[in-house]
Image (cartoon, rainbow, N blue to C red):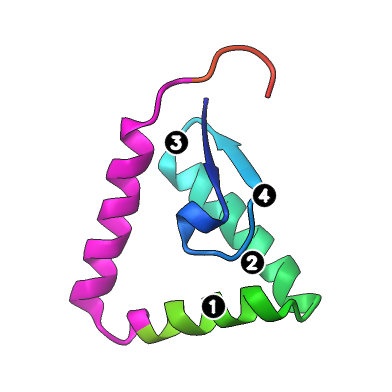
Amino acid sequence: MKTMSCKQLGGACDEEFHANSFEEIAELSKQHGTEMLHQKDAAHLKAMDEMMQLMQKPDEMVAWFEGKRREFEALPERVGPV
């Protein structure tokens, strides 16, 4: 199991997500983002706006996403309870 924070994944806070795969951690981050959107959290809304701007440039978005995947893969495995 590996751990990344909301900030590490392009978000706005230090909440940590724990997952065995990059796809799983990306989904946890997405769920968190949806919760923050519903709460109208200003810092997260700003981060989401920045991500939407990045999505307008497909090549840059792919590069960003793959960079995050490599960052996840390079993390040490965590053993035991989180």
User: Which of these two is toward me, 12 or 17?
Assistant: 12
Please state the horizontal and vertical placement of residue 52, each as a whole percent of the image. Answer: 44, 83
Crowding near the residue tagged with mark 4, few <14, some 14–19, many ≥20 C-alpha atoms within 10 Å:
few
Given the image, on which type of amino acid does mark 3 rest? Ser
Amino acid bearing label 4: Glu
Q: How many marks?
A: 4
Left or right: 35 in relation to 52: right
The residue singled out by tag 1 in the image is 48
Label disc, if present, on residue 70 of the rendered structure: none
Distance between the Cα atoms at labels 1 and 3? 23 Å
Which residue is labeled 4 in the image? 15
Question: Tag 1, which secondary structure?
Answer: helix
Q: CA distance from mark 3 to mark 2?
A: 18 Å
**Mark 1 against mark 4, which lies toward the viewer?**
4
Q: Secondary structure at mark 4?
A: loop
Mark 1 or mark 3: name the one nearer the start of the chain.
3
Of badges 2 and 4, nearer the viewer stands 4
Q: CA distance from mark 4 to mark 3?
A: 18 Å
Q: Give the mark nearer the N terminus: 1 vs 4.
A: 4
The residue labelled by disc 3 is 21
Query: Disc 1 and disc 4: Cα gap in Å?
Result: 16 Å
In the image, residue 63 lies at what x, y percent? 22, 63
Nearest to the observer: residue 3 or residue 26:
3
SS state under label 3: loop
Horizontal side, residue 44 vs residue 73: left or right: right
| Mark earlier in primary sequence (2, 4) | 4
* Disc on the earlier residue, 2 or 1: 2
For the point 52% across and 19% down, the residue is 78
Report which residue position mark 2 lands on. Answer: 33
Mark toward the start of the polypeptide (3 vs 2)? 3
The segment highlighted magenta reads 54-77
